[in-house]
Image (tube, helix red, strand yellow):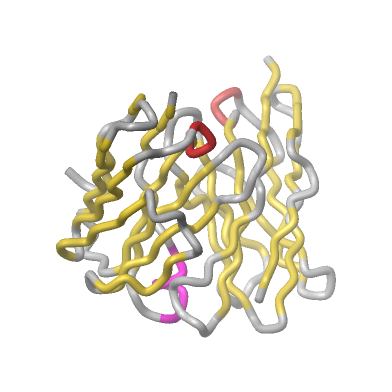
């Protein structure tokens, strides 16, 4: 399999549930990202990982907990979410370096999350 | 810091008609420019990118974008659209330096091609 994959594609959860989103990239990249995409809003960068180390956390609530066990895998652990957290969660990857290569991001298909 | 403005949230256009999707940006440093496309129920896909050189950049599916430094714009055009072009289009910028974390996306423009 090539590119960036995400599972599950759709997830419905209650506010008291705990679930995890998974992302895997097969591009040999070493930077990975979580974005939140909500209707009528720009893409919101949530977390950035560089060689498994978290380098960016854009004031994301603690009910979202990322994990990056290696450069190819990224998880987003979810617990006690709110209905306003319903959105499309996109994973992306890139080279972790300045310049055009690092700026070009490759996205997965996303997980459509609905919080009831 | 940089910002991206996509003035049109939705653009309806008839099939085989031309289309222009507008993107303006602001930045205190030189930037790379990108257009991404998002088809329904999919993630974003890179459509084209501008680094330097010729101000006109083309993609494989007939889209082109022109970099205008004086107007700080990077508008996306296609001379004749198809139904399959119905999607949401995102303009993005990233500074030459400052690394991979600094990509800024616009709010997106939904292109609706009418048969």
- Give the magenta part as a residue range: A98-104
Percent x, y for residue A45?
49, 58
Percent x, y for residue B37?
53, 43
Q: Residue at x 46, y 79 (%)?
A: B99
Q: Is residue A7 above or below residue B33?
A: above
Q: Name the quadrant of the C terminus of chain B.
A: top right
List the single residue furthest toward the top: B115
Horizontal side of residue B94 vs B111, given as left or right = left
Residues A33 and A11: in front is A11
Q: Residue at x 66, y 48 (%)?
A: B107
Residues A113 and B39: in front is A113
Q: Is residue A87 above or below residue B73?
A: above
Horizontal side of residue B58 vs A14, given as left or right = right
Q: Name the quadrant of the N terminus of chain B.
A: bottom right
Quadrant position of residue A55: bottom left
Quadrant position of residue A40: top right
Is A76 magenta? The answer is: no
Q: Is residue B90 above or below residue B73?
A: above
Percent x, y for residue A28?
21, 64
Q: Residue at x 28, y 42 (%)?
A: A21
Q: Residue at x 67, y 72 (%)?
A: B2
Q: How many marks?
A: 0
List the single residue furthest toward the right: B71
Residues A52 and A82: in front is A82
Horizontal side of residue A95 vs B2, given as left or right = left
Percent x, y for residue B110?
66, 35
Is A100 magenta? The answer is: yes
């Amino acid at each position: 399999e090539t590119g960036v994959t995400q599972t599950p594609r759709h997830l419905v959860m209650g506010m008291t549930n705990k679930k995890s989103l998974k992302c895997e990239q097969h591009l040999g990249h070493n930077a990975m990202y979580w974005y939140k995409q909500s209707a009528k809003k720009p893409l919101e960068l949530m977390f950035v990982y560089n060689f498994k180390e978290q380098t960016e956390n854009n004031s994301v609530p603690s009910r979202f907990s990322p994990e990056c066990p290696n450069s190819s895998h990224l998880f987003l652990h979810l617990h006690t979410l709110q209905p306003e957290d319903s959105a499309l969660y996109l994973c992306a990857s890139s080279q972790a370096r300045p310049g055009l290569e690092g700026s070009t991001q490759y996205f997965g298909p996303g997980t459509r999350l609905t919080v009831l | 810091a940089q910002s991206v403005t996509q003035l049109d949230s939705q653009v309806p256009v008839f099939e085989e008609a031309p289309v222009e999707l507008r993107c303006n940006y602001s930045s205190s440093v030189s930037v790379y420019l990108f257009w991404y496309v998002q088809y329904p129920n999919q993630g974003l896909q890179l459509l084209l990118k501008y680094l330097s050189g010729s101000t006109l950049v083309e993609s494989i599916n007939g889209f082109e974008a022109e970099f205008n430094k004086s107007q700080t714009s990077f508008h996306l055009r296609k001379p004749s659209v198809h139904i399959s072009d119905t999607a949401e289009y995102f303009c993005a910028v990233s500074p030459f330096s400052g690394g991979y974390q600094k990509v800024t996306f616009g709010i997106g423009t939904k292109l609706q091609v009418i048969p």
